[in-house]
Image: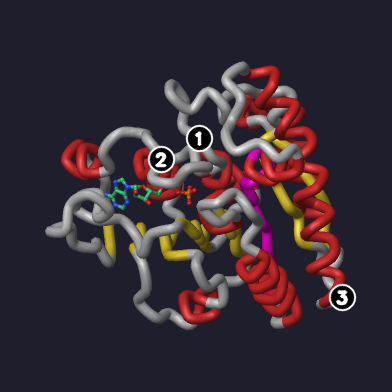
Amino acid sequence: AKRIVIKVGTSTLMYPNGKPNLQAVDELAFTLSDLVNQGKEVIFVSSGAIGIGLNQLNMNRRPSSIPEQQAVAAIGQSELMTIYNRRFRTYNQQIGQVLLTRDVVDYPESRQNVINTLEQLINMQVVPIINENDSVSVDELDHLTKFGDNDFLSAIVAQLINADLLIMLSDIDGFYSANPTTDPTAVLYQQIHQLDQRLFDQAGGNGSGSQFGTGGMLSKLNAAQLVLANNQKMILANGKHPKIIFDLLEGRNIGTLFS
Ligand code: ADP
């Protein structure tokens, strides 16, 4: 795989106590920068703005209203990019922020503009860091009715730039036959070629496992469905140690491969 979209969830970037996981952030910056040095084309989709914003504001949970959440996201997004800028600079890697709404694909002109921007950044060996533009879109925040946490957005990005692989890092080793945090008999799927209702049922609703995550497994399956429909590949793996990406790219069978 040459052109790779990497998506990390809030659960990878934040500790359960709401503090940023500097180890994961640093390892991500190192890993993605090294991949660029290897000649790979790397596009990074990062959640975490609200989690980081809550930490900045010394709040321990999401405010209830959407405007308050959007304000927290605005604060957190800028801090998130500050953190990434520091870490990526250590490895002489340039980054560029791209904030998207999911409906960019519905408007041919904005769709083409996004493609142009991303292609240009990739050409310049810059890592685009993409997040949903929470000030414009409430989709991600309104996670009870919509697919959240950038999962679907990352599949759209993979589609837009014709990526060879979408790597989704979460707080779990992959997709299981049931939620392993509540069902000890759950077994990991190593490979899935086709999604059906039974698998969607096993994803168990769109509730998130983590305190700050919003996606849950259902939104990952929705992303996987788009990826499969586009004849692309997606790997869902544990982001606890982001260096795992090196192993994934060497073809080691870790996590769940959707292909
Ligand atoms: P992220 O923040 O990385 O997007 P989420 O917390 O949104 O992660 O989603 C991952 C969580 O989904 C897991 O920690 C787990 O609790 C839950 N989950 C529900 N069903 C499953 C399943 N069948 N296989 C794996 N995880 C599942």
Mark 2–mark 1 Cα distance, whole angstroms, equals 9 Å
Q: Amino acid at mark 1?
A: Gly
In-image side of 156 versus 123 (left or right): left
Vertical order, 7 against 125 (above or below): above
Crowd around label 2: few <14 · some 14–19 · many ≥20 (10 Å): some
- Circle 3 — which element? loop
Q: Which residue is mark 3?
A: 92
**Could you give the CA–CA distance between mark 2 and mark 3, rounded to whole angstroms?**
35 Å
Q: Amino acid at mark 2?
A: Ser
Quadrant assignment, res 180: bottom left
When asked about the image quadrant of residue 149, the answer is top right
Measured from the top left, where is residue 122 in percent x and y? 77, 61
Quarter of the rendering containing residue 184: bottom left
Q: Position of residue 231 (x, y in %)?
A: 42, 52
Is residue 122 visible in this depiction of the protein? no
| 145 drawn magenta | no
Point 50% across, 76% down: residue = 244
Where 11 falls versus 165 (above or below)?
Answer: above
Label 2 sits on residue: 208
Q: Can residue 15 be spotted in the picture?
A: yes
**For numbered disc 2, what is the local secondary structure?**
loop
Give the number of marks.
Answer: 3
Instruction: Report the magenta residues as a range.
Output: 40-50
